[in-house]
Amino acid sequence: MKKILAVIGARPQFIKHAPIDLAIQGKAKLVTVHTGQHYDENMSAIFFDELGMSKPDYMLDIRSHSHGKQTGRMLEAVEEILQKEQPDLVLVYGDTNSTLAGALAAAKLHIPVAHVEAGLRSHNKAMPEEINRIMTDHVSEVLFAPTDLAVENLKKEGLGERTVRTGDIMYDMMKIAEEKGVVSRQQLGDPYYLATIHRPYNTDDPQRLRKILTALANLDHRVIFPMHPRTKHLTQKNGIDLGTYKNLEVRPAVSYFENLNLMAGATAIITDSGGMQKEAYFLRKQCITVRPETEWVETLTNGWNQLVYKEIAELHTYLGKVPGNYSGNLYGDGASRYAIINKILAL
């Protein structure tokens, strides 16, 4: 039986790993390494119980550091585990420092790497995620691309022969959640918007963060605002009094299924998250992305997703616009996990 070692560490990776973890049981030996990049209870440990995932075989607890220091520590720790476990293949997801560290450690030991969610490009190398995803793609043996555009991006970089178009693994997770009956699609009380903000270019500058909070507070419905740990830290550090933004319902970071339910009941989604742009599309919700660009270009089709960055003070003018036609096949059929597992076992 083949031994597959998966490296995860951040909330989006737990979501992407869960369908693989559930579907691969009995077909291969799966060893999971959790780097500890996300370590808040709602951002990490609760996922394994909530999603029914196997507990990680290794918990590194590396936590927050500068990008170089964090990646270096992960690289060293993952290398030691790889030398001990000697897997047939290393599986990495997405575009975090955990992704890059796992891919580099394996490539330097000549262990094949498979990258789930390959081929995404924002074309903004100021984003650490863009560097991570490009480097990971170029050291991987097999690239699992979620969309046609991702396939085209990889072909342009000479990686077409390594590429398999699978559909999006997060769509699999959405389907699993619906099958479990945990996504109600019911509005929770009076109309509301759901907002999440955590990226450095939106939070590190106190003036920028205040502008975003003011724009949210001036909307026509209440705004449920589950606060990412780094955003909470920065509001406290910079003396931002959230109580002055009367329209905001600030909540602690919520679990995956709770977040899906909040999205399903919302009038619209306002976020700088990559994953939530897709989830909003899966749920057929209007999304406003507080970023100057997106790697999920498909969501922009017919106005289902709109980029609002410099125009943040005019946020209210973008909401309420009815999107155009909806294309249900942009991200596959919710069975990408089987295509990924079958390809891995056939290598």
Image: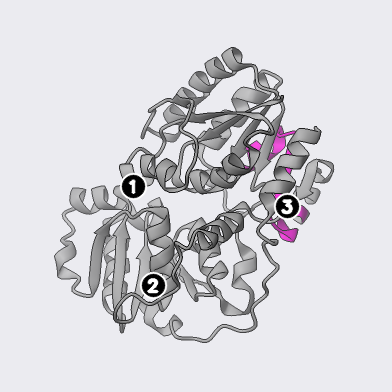
* Residue that mark 1 sits on: 42
User: Which residue is label 3 attached to?
Assistant: 166
Residue that badge 2 annotates: 312
Of the residues tagged 1 and 2, which is closer to the observer?
1
- Which comes sooner in the sequence, label 1 or label 3? 1
Coordinates of residue 202 in the picture (x, y in percent): 37, 58
Helix, strand or loop status at disc 3: loop
Magenta span covers which residues? Answer: 133-151
Q: Residues within 10 Å of mark 1 (few under 14, many from 20)?
A: some
In percent of the image, x 46 and y 65: which residue is there?
183
Residue drawn at x 37%, y 44% as measured from the top left: 46
Determine whether, in the image, residue 164 is placed left or right of residue 58.
right
Query: Could you tell me which secondary element the residue under label 2 belongs to?
Result: helix
Residue 298 among those drawn in magenta: no
User: In the image, what residue type sits under mark 2?
Assistant: Ile
Q: Earlier in the sequence, mark 1 or mark 2?
A: 1
Q: Position of residue 50 (x, y in %)?
A: 42, 48
